[in-house]
Image (spheres, rainbow, N blue to C red):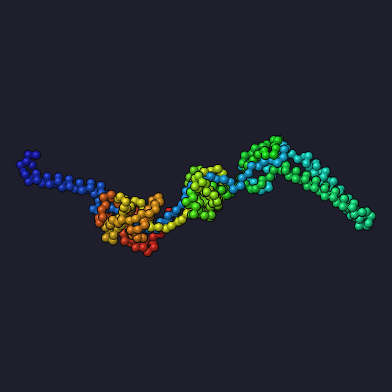
Amino acid sequence: MKLIGRHPFAVAVVAAVLALAYFVAERAMETEGNGNWGGDAAAAVLVQPAQLVEFTDSVQALGTTHANESVSVTAKVTETVSRVSFEDGDLVKKGDVLVELTNAEELAQLDEDRATYEEARKQLERIKDLVSRGATAQTQLDTQQSLVEQAKARMDADQVRLADRLIRAPFSGRLGLRQVSVGTLVTPGTVITTLDDIDTLKVDFTVPEVYLDTIKEGQQVLAQTSAFPDRQFEGKVAVVDTRIDPVTRSAKVRALIPNQDHDLRPGMLLTINVTRSRDQVLAVPETAVSDLGSHSYLFVLTKDNHARQREVKLGRRKPGYVEIVSGLDLGEPVIIEHPDTLRDGEVVRVIPGGSGEGTMDIQASKAGALPPAQS
């Protein structure tokens, strides 16, 4: 210290060195704060050419699933159950026998009436032979013909009563829970089980009347449910109700959704999206756009690596993208990420990570080498 005090020139040198060190440190901190990654003077940015992105216009609603066909299988007569031929949840075909009711009395009656019919038919053949030889009157033949027909009608009635004691599946589908056991006394209306055709599900939902002009039969619908959060179920609009609810000013719409794997069940709540239109529009990532009052701006990259601020008019939005209605051309290099301090005309440095860098990517986009982004 005594040496420095005796040499003023040394003091001046030390002070200059300290000032220079302070200045360098301050500039380094300022550069880091401005986002100049890598230590270069130019601001580091990500660039992506303006491209076409698919925007889907849809109507969203909540819907409830219903089986394509649904019925409660019931008995037609009062009788006890003699046999159950299904288990809970079985898949059955139309006409399969589900339950047999006791039918011993009906079988005996059928045997008796069949014997009567056979005897009456044989007697009719004998009378026909006699009439052909003129040995008996035609009236006797007519009387016997009537007896044969009566016996045949009684036999047919017996077969119908027997059929009522075989409870069959009215259509193909999946059975619900079994409600009876062998020995159960059933009466007309007693529920045996339920049967649902769920290969295709009906989904009913409502849409406001203002959208009715764009909801047509055959339009695609996408459905989601909390039971399968990672899946989308596709279907089509089947019919739009002819009436408008005067209270809600909405109409009921029914869609059909294929359900071959039977994952969906009747009664489920679905979120329905009806696709009204699909458009390819000029769009950029939302991160590229800044709003100032009622105006929107973004930066484009010039050939000499300058950032130029551009006012644009925005349109529709979707997750991650915003439509550019005017102010930008297809293929122009848009700065999608940049420091907050970036100013118009500032020199920038393009870093890897964007969909395009520099002039080469710009020309490739204009030539159609870069495919449009997908929704």
Q: Is residue 370 above or below residue 257?
A: below
Image coordinates for residue 44, horizontal then vertical, percent: 28, 53
**Rendered image quadrant of residue 22:** top left
Q: Is residue 200 left or right of residue 288?
A: right
Image coordinates for residue 328, horizontal then vertical, percent: 34, 59
Count of numbered circles on the image:
0
Give 186 or 36, whichever is nearer the viewer.
186
Which residue is situated farthest in the right direction here? 135
- In the picture, the quarter occupied by the N terminus is top left
Which residue is situated farthest in the bottom direction here? 367
Q: Is residue 79 above or below residue 319?
A: above
**Rendered image quadrant of residue 163:** top right
Q: Is residue 271 above or below residue 366?
A: above
- Which residue is pictured at 67% across the width and 38% down the height? 190
- In the picture, the quarter occupied by the C terminus is bottom left
Q: Is residue 166 left or right of residue 264?
A: right
Residue 85 shows in this picture: no
- Which residue is pictured at 14% across the width and 46% down the height? 19
Image coordinates for residue 6, horizontal then vertical, percent: 5, 42
Q: Is residue 176 left or right of residue 319?
A: right
Image coordinates for residue 234, horizontal then vertical, percent: 52, 51
- Which residue is pictured at 38% across the width and 54% down the height? 315
